[in-house]
Amino acid sequence: MDRLSLHAEERKVLGKKVKALRRNGQLPAHVFGKKVETESVTVDKKTFLKTFGEAGETGLIDLKIGAEKVRPVMVRGVQYDPISGEPIHIDFYQVNLTQKVKVPVPLVLKGEEPESVKLGETIVLQTMHELEVEALPTDLVENIEIDITPLQNIDDAITVGQLNFDRSKLTVDAQEDEIVVKLAPAITEEMQKQMAEEAAEAAAQTAAETAAEVGEAGAEAPVEGEAPKEGGEEKPAEQSQEEAPKE
């Protein structure tokens, strides 16, 4: 991976006063590492975002502090404002170029999807999105690309052992037979079984509710020839005009 560079200035402003730096387009940061003195610096926000976009969390950056000092660093963490989403602080980790480091490397899919995916019959299921590797800082890669073109039939898969990268420089922390990406049915058998069970349960519930409603209706319906009841008491049948008592 190409070495990038980023200019920084020593920072003496600390605490709540750093808000003024952010208003002026500067980001506060710390530089730390093993057996190195932690240093407070500032970097230009726009320049940092551009550099971070190219380096990511695996790229090596020459952090030039002031006019003379250069520290080889990686971006170990960026803090963001929870409301605006803007970066507010950076942690740079100074590396020893002669010692290996462990970092997660993104796994990026490329290649042509099979026709079954376009027809909605299958999906490309990525079960692993990054791979932890150990390497010298100068040997780290931005990402590992995976060609999915060979995936043509259901259950076709690509494992860690089939990934294409320089194994003489990168050591991976994963089993060789661990699946990274596979071609799966759009609806799995497990999902179909679950959907069938849910449908059966819903049908049974509906049938039980219908039976209960029918039973209640039958209990409340008056027997032919009997007067309907109101309030739980029997209501006398109305007399006809002919039988009505005379005043």
Image (tube, rainbow, N blue to C red):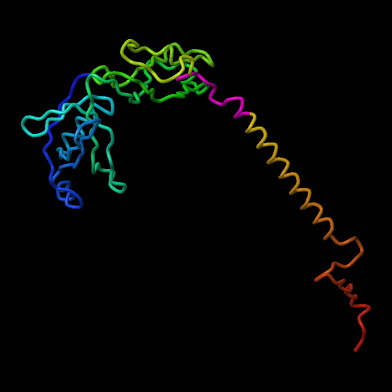
Q: Which residues are magenta?
A: 179-192
Q: Quadrant of residue 130?
A: top left
Q: Is residue 97 above or below residue 41?
A: above
Q: Residue at x 23, y 44 (%)?
A: 88
| Residue nearest the observer in this picture, 105 or 119 | 105
Q: Is residue 2 magenta?
A: no
Side (left or right) of 140 relative to 153 = left
In this picture, is 156 found above or below 64?
Answer: above
Residue 230 on image: x %, y %? 81, 70
Q: Is residue 83 left or right of residue 183?
A: left
For image coordinates 24% across by 24% down, the residue present is 59
Residue 165: % across, % down: 34, 13
In this view, the residue farthest toward the bottom is: 247
Residue 132 screen position, x and y as percent: 37, 23
What is the quadrant of residue 188 in the picture? top right
Point out the image quarter for the N terminus: top left
Residue, x 8% and y 34% (percent of image)?
66
Q: Position of residue 155 (x, y in %)?
A: 53, 16
Looking at the image, residue 153 lies above or below residue 193? above
- Out of 105 and 115, give the one closest to the viewer: 105
Q: Is residue 36 left or right of residue 157?
A: left
The total of numbered circles placed on residues is 0
Quarter of the image containing the C terminus? bottom right
